[in-house]
Image: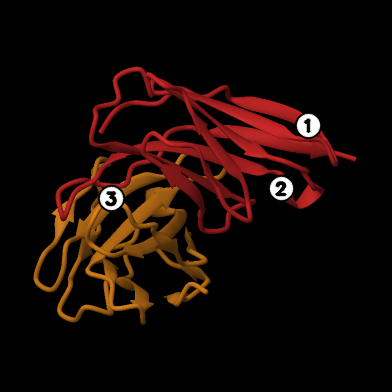
Amino acid sequence: DAKTTQPPSMDCAEGRAANLPCNHSTISGNEYVYWYRQIHSQGPQYIIHGLKNNETNEMASLIITEDRKSSTLILPHATLRDTAVYYCIVRVDETSGSRLTFGEGTQLTVNP
Amino acid sequence: EADIYQTPRYLVIGTGKKITLECSQTMGHDKMYWYQQDPGMELHLIHYSYGVNSTEKGDLSSESTVSRIRTEHFPLTLESARPSHTSQYLCASSELGGRTEAFFGQGTRLTVV
């Protein structure tokens, strides 16, 4: 699976959009971009994933560049409860072969 | 709603004891995972399974062992606990296929004294 690079930390004001970047310059054509977050020491929570088109769900939007070498997770109206570590993961669309591995992620702090 | 459960949530145990951390899921998922995470640090994959009778080592070497006799259960065992095993252990499951999300349990925080 391709390696990802994320900034170690970011701050955001409550009510503003939080834009979390991720670089995955070695991504392959059959690899998906996934985002998870972990609040305190709870189990990680799935947020969203995509292949090449932009995606949106009730939690967030995912913008993937045309060359697929980077992506941005957007939380449109951040709240204090969005304070968490956010992980960007690139994962092949496999039937059984690939693992689910996490990097260091970005610590997002939403400030009042 | 995720249906994956870990027990116990917290465990304090003496050195040399044998322990088993339980993980169960009711979603019928074939893939299951165990991660180890120290406070403030990243998650490290220590074991995973593709289905019944399948177990694989993860990226981080671990003295623990796992078994997968039933689809819904993926217990992790430490034959002789040591203080170096003190950590949080997180279990997860997913369907086969890459375009599916993984669901995580709440974790077991293990302290070996």
Specify the subunit that label 3 lies on: B
Residue B75's place in the image compared with A90, above or below, is: below
Query: Are both tags, 1 and 3, on one chain?
Result: no
Q: Crowdedness of circle 2 by 10 Å Cα count: few (<14), some, many (20+)?
A: some
Residue A35, x across and y down, in percent: 48, 43
Residue at 52 percent of width and 66 percent of height: B106
Residue at (22% x, 69% y) in the render:
B30
Instruction: Work out whether mark 1 precedes mark 2 in sequence or the reverse, and give the earlier one.
Output: 1
- Graded by Cα atoms within 10 Å as few (under 14), some (14 to 19) or many (20 or more), the crowding at tag 1 reads many
Q: Amino acid at mark 1?
A: Cys
Q: Mark 3 highlights which residue?
A: B46
Disc 1 versus disc 3: nearer the observer: 1
User: What number is the disc on residue A82?
Assistant: 2
- Amino acid type at circle 2 is Asp
For the point 33% across and 70% down, which residue is it? Answer: B17
Mark 3 crowdedness (10 Å alpha carbons): few <14, some 14-19, many ≥20: many
Q: Chain of mark 2?
A: A
Evaluate if marks 1 and 2 touch, with contact meaning CB atoms under 8 Å apart. yes
* Quadrant of the drawing holding the N terminus of chain A: top left
Relative depth, front residue between A91 and B92: A91
Question: Looking at the image, is A48 positioned above or below residue B77?
Answer: above
Residue at screen point 28% across, 71% down: B29
Say which mark, if any, is on residue A12: 1
Disc 1 from disc 2: Cα separation? 10 Å
Q: Nearer the viewer, residue B8 or A61?
A: A61
Identify the hue of chain A: red
Taking depth in this image into account, of A57 and B30 the one nearest to the observer is A57
Left or right of A76, for residue A106: left
Dot 1 falls on which chain? A
Residue A34 shows which numbered tag?
Answer: none
Tag 3: amino acid = Ile
